[in-house]
Amino acid sequence: MSTRTRMQWLAAVAAGAMLLAAGCQRSEGDKATTSALPADKMASSSTSMVPAAPMSAADDAMITSKVKEAVAADPSLKSTDINVDTKEGVVTLAGTVASDDLKQKATQAAQGVQGVKSVSDQLVVKSS
């Protein structure tokens, strides 16, 4: 199976997991409210911003998939050995690259993905 086929398959699985998780978060008795604060606290809140919900494993899987796609989309990074892991929106890049320039490109590709809070660059530049 080619890398591209694997990436597409992983993206499809991650998207399915996101849809499944989104559908499971509400029960019939839930009211249509988007507030993370109780109603009595909303009125007394001094700010209009609502705290963001914590990221789920499905969110992390989707981010990982999108970062892998972004790395694979760059021809200079396509043949590199870069592993991607995501936990609570923090992407970790590990593996080896041929130059500091490729290391920087991989980090920038990860930072450009929606949902990425930060990137932990653990890439090693291998000597030629």
Image (cartoon, rainbow, N blue to C red):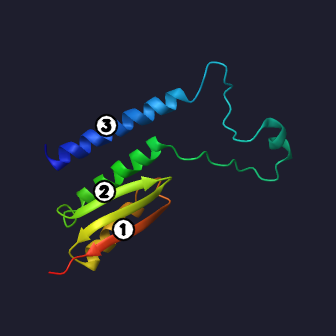
What is the three-letter code of the residue carrying label 2?
Answer: Ala
Name which quarter of the figure residue 112 lies in: bottom left
Which residue is under mark 1? 107
Front residue of 62/86: it is: 86
Label 1 sits on a secondary structure element that is helix
Task: State which quarter of the image contains the N terminus.
Answer: top left
Q: Residue at x 75, y 49 (%)?
A: 48
95 is higher (above) or lower (below) than 3: below
62 is higher (above) or lower (below) than 26: below
Which residue is under mark 2? 70
Residue 12: give its label.
Answer: 3
The image position of residue 125, as x and y in percent, is: 26, 77
Label 3 sits on a secondary structure element that is helix
Task: State which quarter of the image contains the C terminus.
Answer: bottom left
The mark that comes first in sequence, 2 or 3, is 3
Q: Is residue 77 left or right of residue 18?
A: left
What is the three-letter code of the residue carrying label 1?
Answer: Thr
Q: Which residue is drawn at 29% across and 74% down?
A: 124
76 is higher (above) or lower (below) than 3: below
Q: Is residue 127 left or right of residue 86?
A: left
